[in-house]
Image (cartoon, helix red, strand yellow):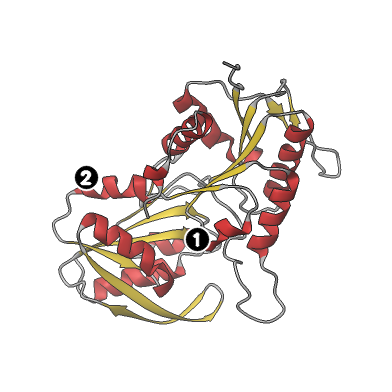
Amino acid sequence: MPRKAPLKVFTGTATSYLTELICSNLNIELGKSSCPRFSDGEFEPCFEETIRGSYVFIVQSTFPPSDNLWELLLMIDAAKRASAYKVIAVIPYFGYARQDRKDKPRVSIGAKLAADVLSKAGIDRIITVDLHADQIQGFFDAPVDHLYASSLFVPYIKEMNLPNVVIASPDVGGTKRANTYAKLLETDLVICHKARSKANVIGDMTVIGDVKGKDVIIVDDIIDTAGTITTAANLFIEKGATSVRAFATHPILSGPAIERIENSALEVIYFTDTIPLKNHLEKIKTISIAPLLADVIDKVYYYKSISSFYIQ
């Protein structure tokens, strides 16, 4: 029987904290790499150990700045040129995913362009978590393992043993996600309908469903400026909710997000660590995605089924 290609996991600079946890869960050492910079800011990622004939997993989220995406592309290219057997990009948070269609004239489809350049760089597979739109999987020429944080969040919510849980979507676009949580938890579902005057600005918001006397749990994939989720939380309390909590996968938290969360009716908000948290509030808690990603990496490496992770 031919020798199995060795497994090696490397990290980009943006997600080294997460990759170290993944390697700890896999009980392997983090691969040696570096990313020296020239005086003008240009950088040159380099593998500091042989990867010839290896399964190379490169972990890097592609949140801003765009250097994070470019660093991942350079690492993929370097791995291919160093004769790696397979190169798998583990992208916990896939940036540009909100640009998945032309929703107004004369704009790009950024998610498709990002997928194209990753495919062109030579990836053999993508592992990612909670894409903003499921159809983005089809933008890639390589196989995509699209994982859902619900496999972490649902057991956690059950352990909270709240007496009158209702699942809420902060907008109509998240209805499918919230409906799946409601089915898995056997609870009712409420939906917020919002009207945006422009990007990141909320107009009017109304609640579809009953929240009076309920412990509301809002579920979402991305929280950016936190305008939608905090407006929804405050509205639920006005409508008679007993408490409001939130679970979201990707903590972008830009602009006034931290201040809005701190001053909102939210009791607590749980994120995964797909993006590093720059600010820490008492209200913000983290559930690590590392054990899930480590398990999937192990199963991909040993050609085992990962269908059990495809719950949303």
- Kindly identify the residue that appears in the image at 51 percent across and 56 percent down: 131
Foreground pick, 40 / 180: 180
Question: Is the residue marked by circle 2 packed among few (<14), some (14-19), or many (20+) residues within 10 Å?
Answer: few
Foreground pick, 42 / 155: 155
Q: Quadrant of residue 99?
A: bottom right
Q: How far from the left and from the top, in percent, is residue 83?
A: 75, 28
Foreground pick, 4 / 268: 4
Write down the residue under mark 2: 159
Give the distance between the C-alpha atoms of the residues marked 2 and 1, in whole angstroms.
28 Å
Q: How far from the left and from the top, in percent, is residue 126?
A: 58, 45
- Kindly identify the residue that appears in the image at 50 percent across and 60 percent down: 134
Q: How far from the left and from the top, in percent, is residue 62?
A: 62, 50
Write down the residue under mark 1: 134
- Kindly identify the residue that appears in the image at 41 percent across and 61 percent down: 220
In the displayed structure image, the side of residue 40 where residue 108 appears, left or right: left
Q: Which of marks 2 and 1 is nearer the N terminus?
A: 1
Question: Is the residue marked by circle 1 packed among few (<14), some (14-19), or many (20+) residues within 10 Å?
Answer: few
Whether residue 35 is visible here, answered yes or no, is no
- Where is 233 relative to 162, above or below? below
In the displayed structure image, the side of residue 177 where residue 209 appears, left or right: left
Q: Quadrant of the N terminus?
A: top right
- Kindly identify the residue that appears in the image at 45 percent across and 58 percent down: 221
Q: How far from the left and from the top, in percent, is residue 289?
A: 44, 41
| Residue type beneath disc 2 | Glu
The disc placed on residue 288 is none
Whether residue 57 is visible here, answered yes or no, is yes
Q: In which quarter of the image is the C terminus?
A: bottom left
Q: In which quarter of the image is residue 306?
A: top left
For discs 2 and 1, the disc positioned in front in the rendered view: 1
| Residue type beneath disc 1 | Asp
